[in-house]
Amino acid sequence: MTATPRTSLEELPLRPELRGRTPYGAPQLRVRHRLNTNENPHPLPTELLADLGAALGHAAVELNRYPDRDALGLRGDLAAYLTRTSGEPVGPAQVWAANGSNEVLQQVLQAFGGAGRTALGFTPSYSMHPIISAGTGTAWVDGHRREDFTIDPAQAAAQVREVRPDVVFVTSPNNPTGTAVALETITGIHDATSYGHGRAGVVVVDEAYTEFARTGTRSALTLLPGRPRLLVSRTMSKAFGMAGLRLGYLAADPAVVDALQLVRLPYHLSSLTQAAARTALAHTDALLATVDAVKAQRDRIVAALPGLGLTSVPSDANFVLFGRFADAPGVWQALLERDVLVRDVGLPGWLRVTAGTPQETDAFLTALGEVARELH
Ligand code: PMP
């Protein structure tokens, strides 16, 4: 029997702007040390696992019914977490949740971007921002960064005034560089999105890694009062160590939440997801207990690099951008051959490594030491 020839994408009536694109694709390889997707490697607390079993069993009894469409209980728990950790009072009506912050960002673009509209983000930054923009028919413009990957506040505001984007992304701490953005830079960018004649843009501060920030870094949540076009997105995938749960959320003016409800699919958050997320939030302190340990490993990696003749970008996240290499893809391959998977984010000269357990740091630094010796 001959196999049916595989249909190529060119043969399909695909939207023209999606032609030639590649899907988001961090390799999911069976490697001993997986340090490429910024997950938290610490095992979940056993008390949480027990409570999750009970909560999911309880929720399963009602699986014949649709979930709470507005996820009110979960949004209340998330609002309480944000209020407690930022000192900024955040109410449930200001919070929205979806399947990962990727889905939250997609809903933001569906509501505020789309055909004929433009999004701008300061590259290099999170690669999904332009990908979700393309998926929602939103045009994309690269914003400028300095050589050291920081954002020049005056240049950023000027670029926003010139391009007049409908949606601006500011990732803080930034992925893949780890760079935190000063609140004054964010307010400057926000002020620049008032274009006059009733036109304005929204500013999304993507705070996926904010729990790992070094002391003294304040969340953009504190900027929300009086700024209805400022949106702060968060996730339980990183510091909470719940990447498999798929739970992201956003805090903003209640009117923004009303806008997102116009585009969300009904019952988008399953009863199981809502129950698991609420159970995890009840164990917030135990879950976040690993954050300091991860930060210590990040700082250990940063401190060890100069001894290997390497450097890094100052990081407020749970990863480090390190280099510089004449051949970063070659170093990526050499580390993989030593059972260490890091991320080649496509930035010439640089690679990104996730900070995790002390054993992972040992394995990474040992492998990198061998590779660095071969290079010199
Ligand atoms: N924002 C940033 C900056 C990220 O790095 C990631 C994950 N890599 C996300 C958002 C999405 O996370 P999730 O969908 O798992 O919440």
Image (cartoon, helix red, strand yellow):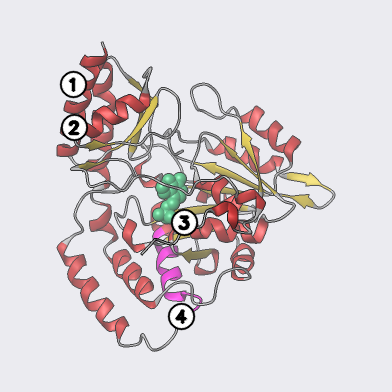
Amino acid carrying label 4: it is Asp
x, y (%) of residue 111?
Answer: 65, 61
Residue 20 versus residue 76 in the image, above or below = above
Quarter that holds the C terminus: top left
Q: Nearer the viewer, mark 2 or mark 3?
A: 2
Amino acid of disc 3: Ser
Find disc 3 in the rendering and name its residue. 101
Q: Is residue 237 above or below residue 147?
A: below
Cα gap from disc 1 to disc 4, whole angstroms: 54 Å
Q: Can you tell which mark lies on residue 370? A: 1
State yes or no: discs 2 and 1 in contact (Cβ < 8 Å).
yes
- What segment is highlighted magenta in the picture? 69-81
Residue at image point 29% right, 70% down: 279
- Residue matched to label 4: 68
Whether residue 56 appears in this view of the structure is yes
Q: Main secondary structure of the magenta part?
A: helix
Residue 290 is situated, as x and y percent measured from the top left of the image, at: 23, 48
